[in-house]
Image: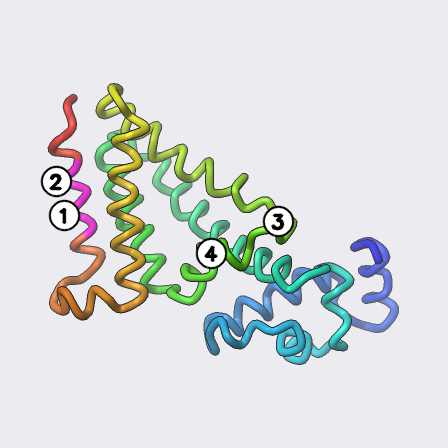
Amino acid sequence: MSAKVGEVVCRIVGMPESLREHLVDVGVDLLETDGFSALGLRAIARAAGVSHGAPRRWFPTHAALLAAIAARGFGELIERFAVLATIDDPRERLRRMAVDYVDFAVSRPEMFTLMFRHDLLAGSGENLRATTRPLYGQVVELVAAVAPESAPQRALALWTNVHGLATIAVNRTLDIVAPDQDPRTLVDRIVREHLAGLSG
């Protein structure tokens, strides 16, 4: 069944006009409150107040629904980074982006983890790469503004550190190796030190 036909069905039976968005909303809520293990198709359908088969009208596979939920997380990151677009200094903007990225990870750990579960999201039909590439592209552009030579390699080195820190903060490894370190403060220092090593 197409999405348009599904919406007509929703109106007839008194469901929300956009069941697709409602299911994603419920999935996001379940992810935040009960964790990834709660994101079964049946569990989401039950929490959304629809039949177990209803999600299949919009999401042919479980991975497709998970990818739609993950896309919400990327959307929030895009919004966070968009606010920083008014910062003219590329060094300051990079620093703020890194801090916001880690803050997102530690404040939304379940969402952050899902967003990078490529093993689960591959083949979902949702083109998440089209979302993530522009985000990373901003990092490359800002690094190039600071140090044009070898900007892609320098950007990769910087963002590997930032994403790596976010990951070990989320999986609590940071609590073991550096229990007294706030990840936001730590990433700020990492970026400052990295930028200090760049020319320009």
Quadrant location of residue 196?
A: top left
Q: What residue did someone put label 3 on?
A: 126
- Packing grade of label 1 (10 A; few <14, some 14-19, many >=20) is some
Mark pair 1, 3: CA separation: 35 Å
Rendering coords of residue 129 (x, y %): 52, 42
Task: Look at the numbered disc 3 and give the secondary structure of its residue.
Answer: loop
Mark pair 1, 4: CA separation: 25 Å
Does the residue at mark 2 contact the one at mark 1 (Cβ under 8 Å)? Answer: yes
Q: Does the magenta stretch include residue 106?
A: no
Does the residue at mark 1 contact the one at mark 3 (Cβ under 8 Å)? Answer: no
Residue kind at label 4, given as amino acid type: Met
Instruction: Give whichever of discs 1 and 4 has the lower sequence position.
Output: 4
Checking the image for residue 193, the label placed there is: 2
Mark pair 2, 1: CA separation: 6 Å
Question: Which range is magenta?
Answer: 187-194
Rendering coords of residue 20 (x, y %): 70, 61
User: In the rendered view, does 64 fall on the left or right side of 82?
Assistant: right
Q: What residue did someone put label 1 on?
A: 189
- 199 is higher (above) or lower (below) than 191: above
Along the line of sight, which residue is nearer the eye, 55 or 79?
A: 55
